[in-house]
């Protein structure tokens, strides 16, 4: 995984500055708000991304936005993104059909430090659409299973109908070498599983060896401080807790300062940070919420 400014000067950096065309080769609706798009570069090259990295995706007339990879780089001929319909661009992306094209720049940013995570127990904690970037990491671990210790996934969605990647959830749940805890905030008539926020099964049902565990956490900003408190309570240190942060990006590559968090550029230094990097930068996870930026 490399940030744009770490590329060797001899390498072709065109992809980092100029959008390249990628074709939609499959589309699947995951929930009312979310679609999964499988894309392939027009050049048929692979992107060589790391779990936790992102792309800048563009559509002429609609703009450009950062979107995480949700597929693992171990499955290389195409790549997948999962898009929430929240604004102009993402709603337009929901209308894409197989055969249509988007622009892509990247991959950008520092994702999950998979080399440092090798040999360790992996505890993934996903809230809502945070499962999308974590799916890239989870399937990476699944495909290189012998290189990692325990694989634990705690996933919470608001409602059963908002659960993403139901096929993957069933596959992971059925594996003997995966430990899964799924919950929803609000059950419906058909839901027979756990009810309650994600920190409840994390607190009550997950036992870890804190010295050999790395936690990867992606979800709504409000979740982070509660998850951090639980993990510290379990004896983990801030160095071993990884958070993926979301901010408003423009360039996505450390040039415009739009995503700045104190002395950090979230797009380039992150989006995945060790909790130890964020301590003392209080707005990193304690008080920030998307609507705050508009005040
Ligand atoms: C690293 C990273 C990875 C991401 N990965 C994904 C992903 O995998 N899937 C996904 O669906 N999304 C992802 N996002 C979020 C996505 O980039 C945004 O939702 C993007 O703004 C959508 O663009 P849009 O034009 O559709 O919506 P916009 O018009 O940008 O609106 C998006 C939402 O943000 C609000 N908003 C708009 N402008 C502002 C502002 N200035 N300040 C605060 N809020 C504002 C809007 O009200 C709306 O709720 C990611 C973001 C980051 C930073
Ligand atoms: S989005 Fe431009 S510096 Fe991060």
Image (tube, rainbow, N blue to C red):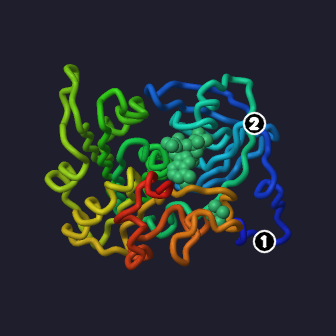
In the image, residue 237 lies at what x, y percent? 30, 75
Residue at the spot x=63%, y=26% of the render? 26
Kindly state the secondary structure of the residue where label 2 is placed. Answer: loop
Residue 261 placement (x, y as % from top left):
52, 70
Nearest the eye: 20 or 246: 246
Picture residue at 25% right of the left edge, 37% below the top:
184
Residue at 61% x, 66% y is 268
Which residue is labeled 2 in the image? 61
Does residue 51 show up? no
- Apparent side of residue 17 relative to residue 145 in the rendered image (left or right): right
| The furthest residue to the left | 204
Q: Nearer the viewer, residue 232 or 59?
A: 59
Q: Is residue 141 above or below residue 6?
A: above
As displayed, is residue 118 above or below residue 99?
below
Examine the rendered structure and indicate whether residue 128 appears above or below residue 117.
Answer: above
Is residue 60 in view? yes
Q: Residue 120 sits in which quadrant? A: bottom left
**Mark 2 / mark 1, whichever is N-terminal:** 1
Which residue is nearer to you in this view: 204 or 258?
A: 258
Question: Within 10 angstroms of label 1, few (less than 14), some, or many (20 or more) residues?
Answer: few
Q: Which mark identifies residue 8?
A: 1
Residue 283 to residue 244: above or below: below
Disc 2 and disc 1: Cα gap in Å?
A: 33 Å
The secondary element bearing badge 1 is classed as loop
Q: Quadrant of the N terminus?
A: bottom right
Judge from the rendering whether residue 199 lies leftward or rightward of residue 23; answer left or right. Answer: left
Indicate the position of residue 90 as horizontal and vertical percent values. 59, 36
On the image, the x and y values in percent for residue 173 come to: 31, 37
Could you classify mark 2 by the number of other residues whose Cα lies within 10 Å: few (under 14), some (14-19), or many (20 or more)? few
């Amino acid at each position: 995984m490399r940030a744009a400014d770490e590329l060797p000067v001899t390498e072709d950096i065109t992809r980092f500055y100029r959008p390249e065309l990628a074709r939609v080769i499959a589309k699947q609706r995951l929930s009312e708000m979310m679609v999964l798009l499988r894309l392939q570069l027009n050049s048929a090259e692979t992107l060589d991304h790391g779990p936790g990295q992102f792309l800048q995706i563009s559509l002429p007339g609609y703009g450009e936005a950062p979107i995480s990879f949700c597929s693992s780089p171990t499955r290389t001929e195409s790549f997948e993104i999962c898009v929430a319909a929240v604004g102009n661009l993402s709603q337009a992306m929901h209308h894409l059909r197989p055969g249509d094209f988007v622009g892509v720049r990247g991959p950008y940013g520092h994702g999950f430090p998979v080399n440092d995570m090798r040999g360790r127990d992996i505890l993934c904690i996903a809230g809502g659409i945070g499962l999308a970037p974590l799916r890239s990491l989870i399937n990476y671990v699944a495909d290189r299973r012998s290189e990692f210790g325990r694989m634990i996934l705690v996933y919470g969605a608001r409602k059963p109908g908002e659960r993403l990647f139901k096929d993957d959830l069933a596959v992971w749940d059925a594996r003997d070498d995966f430990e899964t805890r799924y919950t929803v905030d609000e059950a419906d008539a058909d839901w027979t599983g756990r009810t309650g926020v994600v920190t409840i099964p994390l607190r009550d049902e997950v036992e870890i060896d804190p010295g050999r565990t790395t936690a990867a956490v992606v979800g709504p900003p409000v979740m982070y401080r509660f998850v951090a408190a639980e993990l510290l309570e379990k004896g983990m240190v801030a160095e071993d807790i990884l958070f993926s942060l979301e901010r408003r990006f423009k360039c996505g590559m450390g040039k415009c300062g739009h995503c700045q968090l104190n002395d950090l550029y979230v797009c380039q230094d992150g989006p995945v940070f060790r909790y130890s990097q964020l301590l003392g930068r209080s707005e990193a996870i304690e008080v920030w919420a998307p609507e705050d930026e508009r005040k």
